[in-house]
Amino acid sequence: MIVFVLKRLGSAVLTVALSSLLVFFAVQALPGDVAVQVLGRDATPEAVAALREQLHLNQPAWTRYLSWIGSALHGDLGTSLVSGNAVAANLGLHLRNTLLIAVVTVVVAITSSLVLGVVAGLHRDRWPDTVISWLSLVGMSVPEFVVATLLVLIFSVTVPILPAVVLDGPNASVAELLPAIWLPAAALGVVMAAYIVRMARTSVIDVMASEFVTTATLKGLTRWRVVTRHALPSALLPTLNVIALNVAWLVGGVVVVESVFNYPGLGKLMLESVYDRDLPMLQAIALVSAAIYVVCNLAADLAAMALDPKLRTGRRTATR
Amino acid sequence: MEDRACPPGGGRIQRRTLLGAGLGLVGASVLAACGASGAVAPLPATAATGTPDRGGVLRIARPPASSAETLDPASSLSAYEYLGALYSKLVRGAPDGSVLPDLAESWESDPLGVRWTFRLRRDVTFHDGRPFTSADVVHTVARILDPATSSPQRGVLSPLLDPSGISAPDAVTVVFELKAPNAEFPSLLTAYQCYVVSEGSPIGVGTGPFRLESFTAAGRGRVVANPDHFAGRPVLAAIEYYSISDMQARANALLAGQVDLLAQTNLDFVTARVINASSRATIARSANAQWYGLPMLCTAAPFTDPLVRRAMKLAYDQDSVFKLAIQGAGSVGNDNPVPPGNAVWTDYRVPRDPDRARALLKQAGHDGLQLDVYTSSYDPIFTPMAVAFADSVAEAGIRLNVRTASSDSYFSQIWMHQPLCATYWYTGRPVDQLLNQIFRGGSSYNETAWSDPAFDAMLDAARREMDAGRRRTLYQDAQRYLVDNSGSITPMFADRLVGLSREVVNYAEHGFEFDYLNIGLVRRSS
């Protein structure tokens, strides 16, 4: 088991390292000379040359990568080309704002979608299943920006109870942001929940048809006990990875939804950094997102191991 | 605001046109259902006027220039919407291109147009209480000329003026000694980089109708009425500014009543109709505010050949482009970059003649010309304009392939690099600046790279001419020469469709002038 965990950790570190490489060179490949893009059209040739020098753009990409990753390992993500402030502080602020939405979305969407998925699975082909399946199909098919716009039209324009956009900047306090997080969270929740509902439904159906559930039922256990004690832990297993990917997607910043709500999170910061060609900022965001994906997947794998006796003990039987 | 056409935020983070249209349609249907009226109301032609309530707070949503934007008017990254509220200029531009007094009461030049003397108002103080004097004007213009400031207006003023040429004989007189005669010099001081700042006060302190209370780059800010403003107290008590990059988000904020006015936002027609159909907001226009064009790069094949350039202009149907791309909301362009309404504008127009275009192409050896025309989602009009243009030149045997390029690098990778692309500028440049900055051989904004000594000589002659009537004739000759020879295709000028609350009255904006003094709010009792 320890070997498994160590292997998994090793591959996680390797993934982050490889993605840092990919991120760095992908950012370098963005169209347009960085210095020209940063300084805008009014830049004089001398100013462009000076910025190229300052960014070490005249050095080979490998040298620049090594020095970037070297400082990143020491926690120094560089300074923003646009504002001149430390990348880490600004990134942290936006990450906090994104986390605020992510936590609400994750708690509400995962809980409700698991419940809905299980209910649908237990009532296969009867009306609760039909309704839930249809709703989740709609949720899956409609893009999140359309959901966002509909929510704005309903809850901000027609019945004005929630703000349509965030008017505050990234340094707003949590209390100031609080009224504004519900619509983005709802828009994301709808899209995210749809996938989890489908996944949970399918695995509940699979598990309920399996022999050990039949055995448990034949032993005379109540349906409630069969479902909660025997079926659910196994049924949740395949759902875990879907949940992990969704959480990573949320925490990594959701560009379109944050942009529509003018929400000062990681996704909006990423979009602005692309437009401003703020390379240090962009690299840092991509690296943090990659790390979040890896951590979420790792967490899902470890949780799966905790839930699944076969995974937990498999290693031992193999070495025997 | 960058000096481009590009209000950086305005288009920086523009939604995809299709995407925006899709959202608009969803909105339109929902609102139509709410309003229970099937017919779509036409977009209003003029902004609401009336007697505003005293006081009130106007909330403006604006696209941030950059996360490094500043209140320094001379900078290329100035937060444009704050400037007119906080500062005043020596002179203002009128809608017809003439020059009106502001901080300067009057001005005159010697008979040659070399030595210009401006007399200043005596009753003006900066927001921090310091009196406004000629030294502040000297400081402001010298700063623009200083290469270290990297002001976009430096390229316009530095060929005419050295810092040593500016002097202040007394506290209310400023003298500019030009390097060469220029009859249009005062008009060059109407640019929005020329707002007067004080040497002894921090940036943000001006002489304008509002005082700065707070400002955050790419964030929110607030200015409050300046009761001591020399032209009177403004109607509003305060203005609050909010940065919203996404155009759809700005429109949503207006629909939800979170803001009252969308600055630097040319709404697409679908969104404009949705806003106009709502009970809370409506549309006003800034007439002919956007100059749309398809510059042909004269240094790239096939446009190195003047015959091909002429053929392109003869081949397309500007009326159909005008109708299809902007639904007639504006004026046809006649391939003349000077907007109609300018006092020196000429109605010269070369009628369309696709047969002659075909013959010219044959003569130039470009029979069956095939080309790419580039567009992007940077602006909602680009693609409809390019498509309508490509469609109408087909009649002359020209096959244009419309290609969409990424909007974030459009102005660094496509514009001035590809032989043919869509572009736009804000109108509002004085005619001398417009023609010299964009059409003189070798100038930095010369998007067609057209260089014609005969045309440059016409501009010089116009600058030297001190008689206004004769100067007008010279500028009109220059326009005709441009229409016949340049690489610039101008199908139209479009009205900017501005979204604003139905409570806003006396909104007036033309070129780079916004009336912050008289705009006000009327609380509706509903």
Image (cartoon, coloured by chain):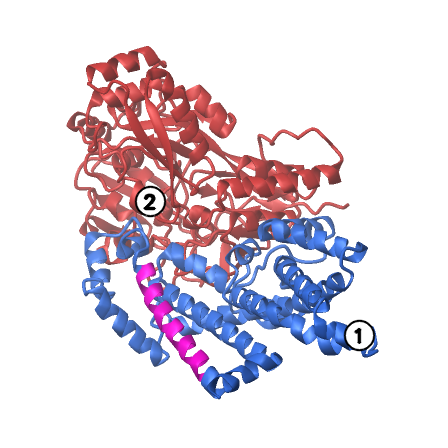
Mark 2 Cα within 10 Å, few/some/many (few <14, many 20+)? Answer: many
* Chain letter of the residue beneath label 2 in the structure image: B
Residue in view at x 40 percent, y 33 percent: B291
Q: Where is B16 relative to A241, above or below?
A: above
Highlighted magenta segment, given as a residue range: A6-27
Give yes or no for residue A22 being in the magenta stretch: yes
Question: What's the amino acid at mark 1?
Answer: Thr
Whether residue B289 is visible here, answered yes or no, is: no
A28 displayed left or right of A266: left
Report which quarter residue B446 is drawn in: top left
Give yes or no for residue A105 being in the magenta stretch: no
Helix, strand or loop for the magenta stretch, by majority: helix
Q: Nearer the viewer, residue B99 or A27?
A: A27
According to the picture, the residue beneath numbered tag 2 turns out to be B411
Letter of the chain in blue? A
Report which quarter residue B104 is drawn in: top left
According to the picture, the residue beneath numbered tag 1 turns out to be A217
Residue A173 on image: x %, y %: 57, 72
Residue A162 on image: x %, y %: 68, 58
Report which quarter residue A192 is drawn in: bottom right
Between the C-alphas of marks 2 and 1, the distance is 69 Å
Q: Nearer the viewer, residue A258 or B129?
A: A258
B131 displayed left or right of B164: right
Residue B513: mark in rendering:
none
* Chain letter of the residue beneath label 1 in the structure image: A
Q: Where is B133 relative to B469, above or below?
A: below
- Tint applied to chain B in the drawing: red
Whether residue B264 is visible here, answered yes or no, is: yes
Residue A249 on image: x %, y %: 52, 64
